Amino acid sequence: MPRKPFVGGNWKSNGTIESAKTLCASLNSGAAAYRNKVEAVVCPITPQISLVNKLVRKSPMKVGAQNVSASKEGAFTGEVSAGQLKDSGIQWTLIGHSERRTKYGETDEVTAQKIEQCQEAGVSVIFCIGELLEEREAGKTDDVNKRMMDAVYGKIKDWKKVVVAYEPVWAIGTGKVATPEQAQDAHAAIRKMISSAVSEEVADAVRILYGGSVTPENCKDLIDKPDIDGFLVGGASLKPTFTDIIAACVPAIPLKKPKFMKVDGVEPAARGVNFFGKVVKAPTKVEGSEDLMEVVVGDDTAIVTLSVRGDRVKVCEVGKTVRVQNAHVSMIKGFIRVAVDKWSALKPAEEEVASVNEKKDMSGVEYELTNN
Ligand code: PEP
């Protein structure tokens, strides 16, 4: 069973009523791109939770808290209990964020008590873990993550109400994002830890998010990694382009056996088309465009001309097999146009395409690229 991607936005101690209203308007207008495909939650400052809840009620966005009490309700000035979150209609909370651990002395024991309270009250948790820079440099990343996870296993009865966020502290708010490989390694190790400590079934199902200087630009390469199931986003969740990060997590139609298929036309335009092809002609610039290039790729049945934007063109070396995911196919003036835009994956593929028939140009009207 594939894991549904999850994106959390942590507004931290930022914003005013006015800025929250503006952000909510952009959350609403970007909702169609991920509705039903990605679970999304924003965590504003506590006094804005009910306002934000109201403002985004027609979108799929849920609203969560940034913190919760380790105790039940009672004589605990300044604290809000898990039961009170639930009573106020708040389904989610962050626990163990590095800022709470390092600036407010939140220990592993306290995170465990908070998770216990949330489990009892039925509040879902984004549980944050991750190492400091010196811990990474000392090769202790997995040890730190294990220690933080070990502290809470005993308190979790319902894993459906837990999402883990791996957030290397050196990447939070620094602009220094982990490489996709660094993040994938840490995520795979965390999943293995959960498998040993709890069960393989739980490890396979639990969402593990990456957090730390995620932006609309760097998120696509991260989400392509098999153990990265989404993001916890700080700074970039305060911008109108936050929904671009959520939309980037929408799973592409899964790739099966690539083939070209004959169709009568492409009407209306098709999105989410996936295929492989070997680059048969070096990229050429499209006249009148700043960054649009044309690249010819194919397989053993036909070739097609792709429009490729930006840096993605760098992978288009003649002879290389590229994998295109989530392309946009449309009919323009009787020709099929395959656009590989900024949210499409275009990268060297491991699969080999046997041979390329350069004569059969299927950029004309009668073929659509598909693999389904
Ligand atoms: C965070 O606060 O959880 C976070 C990941 O922040 P940023 O995205 O700004 O690094």
Image (cartoon, rainbow, N blue to C red):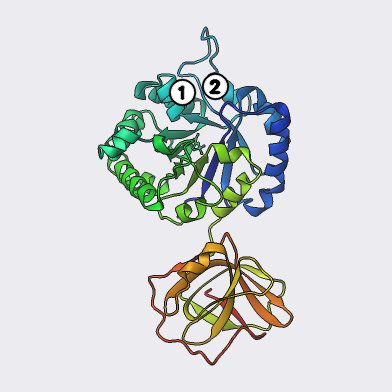
Q: Residue 62: in sight, yes or no? A: yes
Residue 309 quadrant:
bottom right
Q: Which residue has dot 2 on it? A: 83
Residue lying at the far bottom of the rendered structure: 359
Disc 1, ligand 1: is the CB inside 8 Å?
no
Q: Quadrant of the N terminus?
A: bottom left
Inter-mark Cα distance, 2 to 1: 8 Å
Tell me the residue at 58%/60% (across/down): 342
Along the viewing direction, whichever of 184 and 252 lies nearer the viewer: 184
Of pointers 2 and 1, the one earlier in the residue sequence: 2
Give the left or right position of residue 18, taking residue 345 as reference.
right
Look at the numbered disc 1 and give the secondary structure of its residue.
helix
The amino acid at mark 1 is Gln
- Mark sitting on residue 24: none
Residue 18, position as x, y percentages in the image: 73, 30
Residue 153, quarter of picture: top left
Q: Residue furthest top?
A: 75
Does residue 57 appear in this view?
A: no
Secondary structure, mark 2, is helix
Left or right of 280? Residue 184 is left
Bin the neighbour count of mark 1 within 10 Å (Cα to Cα): few under 14, some 14-19, many 20 and up: many
- Dots 2 and 1: beta carbons under 8 Å? yes
Residue 101 placed where, x, y %? 41, 24
Circle count = 2
Q: Amino acid at mark 2?
A: Gly
* Disc number placed over residue 117 in the picture, else none: 1
In the rendering, at what x and y percent does residue 104 appear? 44, 19
